[in-house]
Image (cartoon, grey):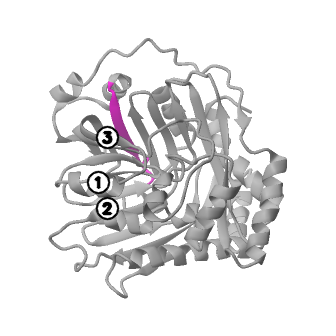
Amino acid sequence: MITKSELYDIIPGIETVCIFNNNNKQNACGYHTYDWLGGFGAEEIINEKVGSVFEKLKTVYNNSWWMGCLGYDLKNEIEKLESNNTDGTHFPDIIFFKPIVVLAETNGVLEFLKGDETQLRQLYHTPTAQNLETQNIQLQDRTSKETYLQNFEKIKQHIIDGDIYEINYCMEFYAENIYINPFATWQKLNANSPTPFAGYLAHKSMHLLGASPERFLKKEKQQLIAQPIKGTIPRGKDAIEDEQFKQQLYYNEKERSENVMIVDLMRNDLAKSSIAGSVHVEELFGIYTFEKLHQMISTVTATVNPDSYGDKINIYDIIKNAFPMGSMTGCPKIRAMQLIEKYEDSKRGFFSGALGYITPEANFDFNVVIRSMIYNAENKYLSFHAGSAITYEADGLSEYEECLLKTQSIRNTLNIL
């Protein structure tokens, strides 16, 4: 049986790969089916721009494994929206594939769920020699601090005027003409910031290096589980200050108001696919600790409506009904997405999309693509975004600093101070 170490040695030589790793953080958010899951090679792949992606997804499922990323801009298929901002990565809006080999780890034991070791090794092709060291990276911000604060005030006025109650406003950091070793960099990021929804996606020159702490949506038999994050505070310098910060976050009225608005939005989204009265908030304002910060996470569950599900399985409508996730858009969702397009300076692409997998039993689990790097090895463009929720109580400078805090693990990984 192949070992994890041997597997990681051959992954850079496999053209299409998708990995999910909960980093043994079962207690951080719970509900994990696998500790680690990987898909290798592609029997079929959907790799295209917005158009009729969701309709195409419905035609290919056929009770089989599928893995990959749904980009944020698939919103344009769901609502009358556009995405015209700067796009440096030049990725498609979806990379979703049917793997040839699926390998899972549970309780320290690796097991082939599809295919075998011979097929896995046949997917390997010797990669071009790669220097494991990342070169010196000159990071640029697409949105200057001055522009961010100016846009913050304009967004705040929309809240005062009643256009929206809350919005997730984000900005991009990027580097051009740089080289990184994608898989080695993801391993380093995962060591620096082990999160329960870490993931890696590679297809040819396109790479997603993810350290997400947030689940978007999981389906296990008839149960749906969403775990939106809203509320952030740094770690303390010692155990006493750490506990003080956790209490400070828990009782912060601004953070609570953000969280409950997104919980209500998610309740509404899940209700579209669920039995009436089955949507429940299992936990509200849970405080969870990660390497660099504490987060406020709530858990919402529901039971899939058999009338819309039944024999004609249509799991993609369940995903579509909640996509994109409320924690990365705002409330009301459509108006928030319109203002995101107006005030943000770059196309989100895979950022604030969803990386996940679907099983032959029609179960699925998708994260929220945050705290993640996007890298195009062909044009040598590296990008990552960060954002925060803006409400009436928000302060512009504090929100800007929160965005920087959320990039700390990525900057450390790239040796950027």
Q: Nearer the viewer, residue 303 or 96?
A: 96
Q: Is residue 307 left or right of residue 324?
A: left
**Camera-nearest label, 3 or 1:** 1
- The residues bearing labels 2 and 1 have C-alpha atoms spaced at a distance of 7 Å
Residue topped by disc 2: 316
- Which mark identifies residue 288? none
Which quadrant is home to the C terminus? top right
Q: Quadrant of residue 159?
A: bottom right
Residue range of the region highlighted in magenta in the rendering: 14-25
Is 199 placed above or below 324 here? above
> Residues at badges 2 and 1 in contact (C-beta under 8 Å)?
yes
| First in sequence: mark 2 vs mark 1 | 1
- Which mark identifies residue 57? 1
- Which mark identifies residue 38? 3
- What residue is at 62 percent from the left and 47 percent from the top? 85
| First in sequence: mark 3 vs mark 1 | 3
Which quadrant is home to the N terminus? top left
